[in-house]
Image (cartoon, helix red, strand yellow):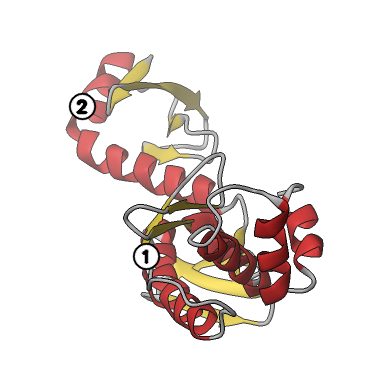
Amino acid sequence: MQLTYNNKNYEIIIEKKKSNRNTYIRVKKDLKIYVTTSFFTTNRFIENLIEENYDRIGKMIDAQEIKAKNNNGFNYLGKQYVVIYCDSEGITFSGDKVYINHDFDIDKWYKKQAKTLFLERLNYNYNNFSRKIPYPKLRIRKMTSRWGVCNINTHIITLNLELIKRDISYLDYVIIHEMSHLIHGDHSTSFWKLVEENMPNYKKYREEMKEF
């Protein structure tokens, strides 16, 4: 038996027990729908029950998928936190733990934090940059193969949202790297000298980021 939700098929596992008088529906972390009921419950009854509770089951599936996504680890500014789910709204940090609601949208929170922090670090590094360059516009988005991109014609620097999960030093390195492209559009010796001029230990971060 299966349930189709959001164009995906979810397996329905029926567990009949002697001790059960009532019927319970749960969605576990394996994203299977478990129906626990008595030996006397018919499949027709279960099918009707699933249909009647379709919306509620959909919400349980959504909650489990969010939980699975979040439990890959919560990383923020170079530190990994253990996710603890609770009923309170918002997000609370305590030691190596982070307390969030099951429905908390981590990606949305990351974007909000990045919008503020990335601009702060861009301004800081721009104001301390060793050469005079046009003030760059900032864009933030998820990228799979690059930490940053600089459009030398439009003076737009795009930073990878994933940098919000790393230590701030890596963010600074990427910003300096991309700002240096406003002077040197390639990766010539002159380019790397300019990067080093503004971050003497840049090689450390460059090598470490290859492992991410």
Q: CA distance from mark 2 to mark 1?
A: 48 Å
The residue under label 1 is which amino acid type? Leu
Of the two numbered discs 2 and 1 on the same chain, state the one appearing first in sequence. Answer: 2
Q: Determine the residue positioned at 56% across, 85% down.
A: 128
Residue 193 left/right relative to 1: right
Q: Determine the residue positioned at 76% across, 47% down.
A: 211
10 Å crowding of disc 1: few (<14), some (14-19), many (20+): some
Query: x, y (%) of residue 29?
Result: 53, 40
Q: Which mark is residue 205?
A: none
Q: Determine the residue positioned at 52% across, 45% down.
A: 68
Corner quadrant of residue 135: bottom left
Q: Residue furthest left?
A: 52
Q: Is residue 129 above or below residue 150?
A: below
Front residue of 12/208: it is 208
Element at label 2? helix
Looking at the image, can residue 53 be seen?
no
